[in-house]
Image (tube, rainbow, N blue to C red):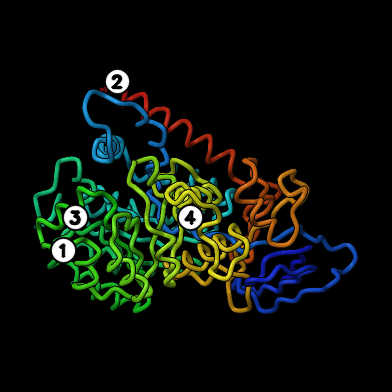
């Protein structure tokens, strides 16, 4: 049994002082008290918050971040970005995937994320290498200490109606039978703090007849496994779905699939009231990725309306144009402010602190989406937490829940000093034990790929 002491922190909806947390050998919190004086000679950490789950990641795209910020003649949109991304994906091997994911996961930990949902569609077609690509992601999680919800992606078509895949999509493809076998092989490899889930890339990439077999396969392994899908991210996707089924994407999903609390609908940017009310009624989580959605020009999800009716959400860094939980939440709130010309939009209905409310809601929603026992500091939850440096200038005038508001909205320097995952310190004094090694490997690899892409252009 470990005991950890904190001067203050966010416990549920309360700001408490002189906190003692008991953590068992399995990483779960067994006791939590406040008003406790630590024994002499025992370190008392500063302000503590529950760590943030990152519910949506395409790890390999971190190496591509910043390399598509140019414009050629003609349209520059999601679809032109996707073509450039496919070009980068062709350079991925299992070794390259592990190097990039390891560096990314260290960045995530330093930024306050303790768990990641790896929306993994870079299978590289060949079945042997498909397993190796998943093992590369698992290896990166083991190397860095992050908790992984591994989400292999079923990807079979280029558009609605089962259109033939494009050549650039070859590394992503599986038959349904091969995909179900991959899930069976992966399940015993994901133990301890790691989980296995199922992902449909999108309605346009998975024919209707493939859904049931994949869901049956994951339910045979784990009835509580999470199920994720990209949906309604772009208006072109919505229009194509209307042409195919005379229904909007989320409308079709709610009517034709068993959407419930296990499901995470990623982006869901372009939805109408019937859809967002239906999502809230089913209890599924909306996976919002504001920095990527802004970078790609996707649009704004109607978060204000959705949260007012009890909708659940979490955040992800997706393409990793930014790896910062604060920036995701800040941009989420600011987008709603700009759309409504108002302030403190995404705050609890009864009022309160916007930053604190966003952090708590995103942490709980992200935990649900990843099927991880985290998201709050409470007995029975896993000890995934972050420690803030209260001496940082951004906190000079802050007290109680204002500390979380300042953390999200006031200033850029990262004030996170320590991060715990499953009772183990993985970031200490702002450093990861293996960061020099993994960042050096990453820089060499991505530099080499970038040069080869330029030479082949």
The residue to which callout 3 is attached is: 205
The residue to which callout 2 is attached is: 455
Location of the N terminus (image quadrant): bottom right
In screen coordinates, is 318 left or right of 361? left
The reply to whether residue 95 is in sight is: no
Residue positioned 73% across, 59% down in the render? 47
The residue to which callout 4 is attached is: 141
- Counting from the top left corner in percent of width and height, residue 221 is at 32, 76
Disc number lying in front (4 or 1): 1
- Counting from the top left corner in percent of width and height, residue 331 is at 49, 48
Disc number lying in front (3 or 2): 3
Residue positioned 44% across, 66% down in the render? 307
The residue to which callout 1 is attached is: 247
* Label 3 element class: loop
Looking at the image, tell me whether mark 3 or mark 4 is earlier in sequence order.
Answer: 4
Residue positioned 50% across, 48% down in the render? 334
Q: What numbered label is drawn on residue 228?
A: none
Tell me if label 4 and label 1 are in contact, CB under 8 Å: no
In three-dimensional space, the C-alpha distance between marks 2 and 1, rounded to whole angstroms, equals 45 Å
- Counting from the top left corner in percent of width and height, residue 140 is at 46, 51
In three-dimensional space, the C-alpha distance between marks 3 and 4, rounded to whole angstroms, equals 27 Å
* Residue 320, quarter of picture: top left
Tell me if label 3 and label 2 are in contact, CB under 8 Å: no
In three-dimensional space, the C-alpha distance between marks 4 and 2, rounded to whole angstroms, equals 33 Å
The reply to whether residue 391 is in sight is: yes
Disc number lying in front (3 or 1): 1
* Residue 414, quarter of picture: top right
* Label 2 element class: helix
Looking at the image, tell me whether mark 3 or mark 1 is earlier in sequence order.
Answer: 3
């Amino acid at each position: 049994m470990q005991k950890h002491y904190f001067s203050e922190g966010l416990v549920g909806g309360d700001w408490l002082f002189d906190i003692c947390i008991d953590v068992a050998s399995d990483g779960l919190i067994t006791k939590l008290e406040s008003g406790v004086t630590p024994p002499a000679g025992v370190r008392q950490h500063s302000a503590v918050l529950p760590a943030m789950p990152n519910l949506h990641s395409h790890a390999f795209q971190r190496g591509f971040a910043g390399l598509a910020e140019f414009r050629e003649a003609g349209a520059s949109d999601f679809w032109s970005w996707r073509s450039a991304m496919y070009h980068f994906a062709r350079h991925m091997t299992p070794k390259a995937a592990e190097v990039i994911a390891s560096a990314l996961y260290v960045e995530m930990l330093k930024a306050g994320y303790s768990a990641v949902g790896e929306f993994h569609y870079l299978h590289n077609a060949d079945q042997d290498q498909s397993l190796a690509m998943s093992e590369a992601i698992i290896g990166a999680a083991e190397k860095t200490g992050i908790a992984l919800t591994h989400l292999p992606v079923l990807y079979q078509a280029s558009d609605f109606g089962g259109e033939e895949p494009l050549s650039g999509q070859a590394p992503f493809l599986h038959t349904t039978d091969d995909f179900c076998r991959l899930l069976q092989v992966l399940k015993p490899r994901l133990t301890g703090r790691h989980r296995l889930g199922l992902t449909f890339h999108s309605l346009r990439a998975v024919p209707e007849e493939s859904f049931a077999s994949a869901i049956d396969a994951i339910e045979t392994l784990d009835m509580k496994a999470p199920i994720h899908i990209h949906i309604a991210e772009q208006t072109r996707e919505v229009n194509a779905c209307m042409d195919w089924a005379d229904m909007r994407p989320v409308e079709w999903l709610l009517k034709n699939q068993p959407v419930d609390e296990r499901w995470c609908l990623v982006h869901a940017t372009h939805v109408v009231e019937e859809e967002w009310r239906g999502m809230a009624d089913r209890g599924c989580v909306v996976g919002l990725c504001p920095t990527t959605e802004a970078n790609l020009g996707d649009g704004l999800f109607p978060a204000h309306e959705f949260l007012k009716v009890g909708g659940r959400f979490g955040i992800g860094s997706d393409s990793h144009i930014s790896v910062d939980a604060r920036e995701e939440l800040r941009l989420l709130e600011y987008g709603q402010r700009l759309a409504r010309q108002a302030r403190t939009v995404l705050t609890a209905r009864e009022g309160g602190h916007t930053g604190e409310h966003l952090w708590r809601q995103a942490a709980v929603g992200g935990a649900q989406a990843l099927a991880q026992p985290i998201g709050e500091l409470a007995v029975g939850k896993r000890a995934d937490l972050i420690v803030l440096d209260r001496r940082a200038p951004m906190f000079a005038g802050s007290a109680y829940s204002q500390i979380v508001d300042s953390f999200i909205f006031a200033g850029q320097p990262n004030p996170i000093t320590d991060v715990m995952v499953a009772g183990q310190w993985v970031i200490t004094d702002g450093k990861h034990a293996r960061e020099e090694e993994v960042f050096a490997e990453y820089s060499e690899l991505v530099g080499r790929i970038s040069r080869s892409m330029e030479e082949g252009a």
